[in-house]
Image (tube, helix red, strand yellow):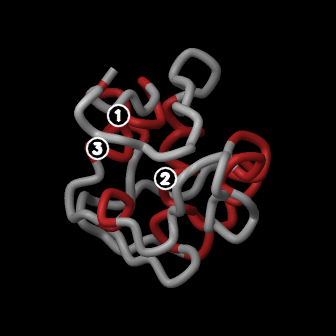
């Protein structure tokens, strides 16, 4: 059952967080860990991330859809480059994962809707 769609800027509901938890565990936790803290050689932390918590979730959505490919001038340290997930995840799954990430581990962000994801494809 899909969580009720809320207007842009709305807080993330408990149902949206729960819906995104399964998607996160399936698609994101391997690298970003259950704790959202990432790992030295896997991925950056999501906890406290400015990209995750930004008022406009566009950058987070783009990273999930298209992967994280930093310019050569920006060092990502030892982290692997995130692969794009847009071809293996639906708009609803990406929105659910984003909502889980934006509402977990002390992060605070507004709700992401499947329509927000569709606009960026």
Q: Residue at the far bottom: name it.
A: 106
Residue under pointer 1: 62
Q: Is residue 112 left or right of residue 119?
A: right
Residue 85 found in image quarter = top right
User: Which residue sits at x=52%, y=31%?
Assistant: 81
Q: Is residue 76 left or right of residue 42?
A: left
Viewer-proximal residue, 56 or 66? Answer: 66
Crowd rating for badge 3 (residues with CA inside 10 Å; few <14, some 14–19, many 20+): some
Asked whether the viewer can see residue 26, the reply is yes
User: Which residue sits at x=70%, y=60%?
Assistant: 21
Residue under pointer 2: 98
- Mark 1 lies on a secondary structure that is helix
Q: Is residue 14 above or below residue 82?
A: below
User: Which residue sits at x=47%, y=46%?
Assistant: 77
- Mark 3 lies on a secondary structure that is helix
Quadrant holding the C terminus = top left
Which label sits in the foreground, 3 or 2? 3
Which label sits in the foreground, 1 or 2? 1
- State the separation of the CA atoms marked 3 and 1: 5 Å
Q: Are marks 3 and 1 in contact (CB under 8 Å)?
A: yes
Considering only order in the chain, which callout, 2 or 3, is on the residue closer to the N terminus?
Answer: 3
Viewer-proximal residue, 75 or 111? Answer: 75
Considering only order in the chain, which callout, 2 or 1, is on the residue closer to the N terminus?
Answer: 1
Residue under pointer 3: 59
Q: Is residue 101 above or below residue 43?
A: below
- State the separation of the CA atoms marked 3 and 2: 11 Å
Crowd rating for badge 2 (residues with CA inside 10 Å; few <14, some 14–19, many 20+): many
Residue 111: horizontal and vertical position, in percent?
A: 38, 62
Crowd rating for badge 1 (residues with CA inside 10 Å; few <14, some 14–19, many 20+): some
Residue 11: horizontal and vertical position, in percent?
A: 36, 74
């Amino acid at each position: 059952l899909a969580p009720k769609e809320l207007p842009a800027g709305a807080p993330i509901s408990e149902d949206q967080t729960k819906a995104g938890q399964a998607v996160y565990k399936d698609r994101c936790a391997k690298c970003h860990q259950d704790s959202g803290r990432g790992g030295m050689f896997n991925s950056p932390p999501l906890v406290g991330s400015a990209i995750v918590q930004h008022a406009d979730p566009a950058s987070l959505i783009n990273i999930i859809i298209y992967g994280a490919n930093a310019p050569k001038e920006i060092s990502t340290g030892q982290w692997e480059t995130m692969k794009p997930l847009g071809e293996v995840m639906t708009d609803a799954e990406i929105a659910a994962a984003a909502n889980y990430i934006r509402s977990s581990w002390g992060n605070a962000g507004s709700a992401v809707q499947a329509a927000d994801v569709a606009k960026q494809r």
